[in-house]
Amino acid sequence: MKVQFSDEECHRMFEAVIDQLVALDLSKADRATLRRWRSDDMTPGSPLMQRLALRLNEEIQISHNRTEVSPIKKPDWV
């Protein structure tokens, strides 16, 4: 099975995480930094967002491959 998120889907997930971080009890400077990072660097279609989507998809695939059951079973008497 292969799960692949588009750049737009990754951007929506990123926005949700940033919104939660901004809602925390952070200083004004920290909240402003997060908002600036979101609006300046992590826009939909930006190279950084494309890299995030690529990395997210790679990590999900690696995690899925790790959880697949191997068809080769060791006998329990060995």
Image: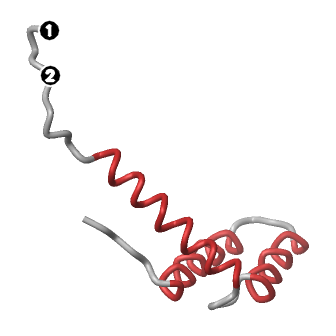
Residue 1 vs residue 27: left or right?
Answer: left
Residue 29 vs residue 64: left or right?
Answer: right
SS of the residue under disc 1: loop
Residue 2's quadrant in the figure?
A: bottom left
Q: Is residue 25 above or below residue 72?
A: below
Residue 17's quadrant in the figure?
A: bottom right
SS of the residue under disc 2: loop
Q: Residue farthest to the front?
A: 72
Q: Is residue 68 above or below residue 61?
A: above
Measured in 3D between alpha carbons, the distance from the residue under mark 1 to the one under mark 2, in whole angstroms, is: 7 Å
Amino acid carrying label 2: it is Lys
Name the residue beneath numbered marker 2.
Answer: 74
The spot of residue 10 in percent (x, y) is 52, 79
Where is the N terminus found, in terms of image quarters? Answer: bottom left
| Image disc number at residue 13 | none
Say which residue appears at 61% left-offset and 80% top-offset: 50
In the image shown, does 17 or 61 lie closer to the viewer? 61
The spot of residue 63 in percent (x, y) is 39, 52
Where is the C terminus found, in terms of image quarters? Answer: top left
Q: Is residue 55 above or below residue 28?
A: above
Mark 1 and 2 residues: CB-CB less than 8 Å, in contact? yes
Amino acid carrying label 1: it is Val
The spot of residue 70 in percent (x, y) is 20, 39
Badge 2: few (under 14), some or many (20 or more) residues near its Cα, within 10 Å?
A: few
Name the residue beneath numbered marker 1.
Answer: 78
In the image shown, does 76 or 20 lie closer to the viewer? 76
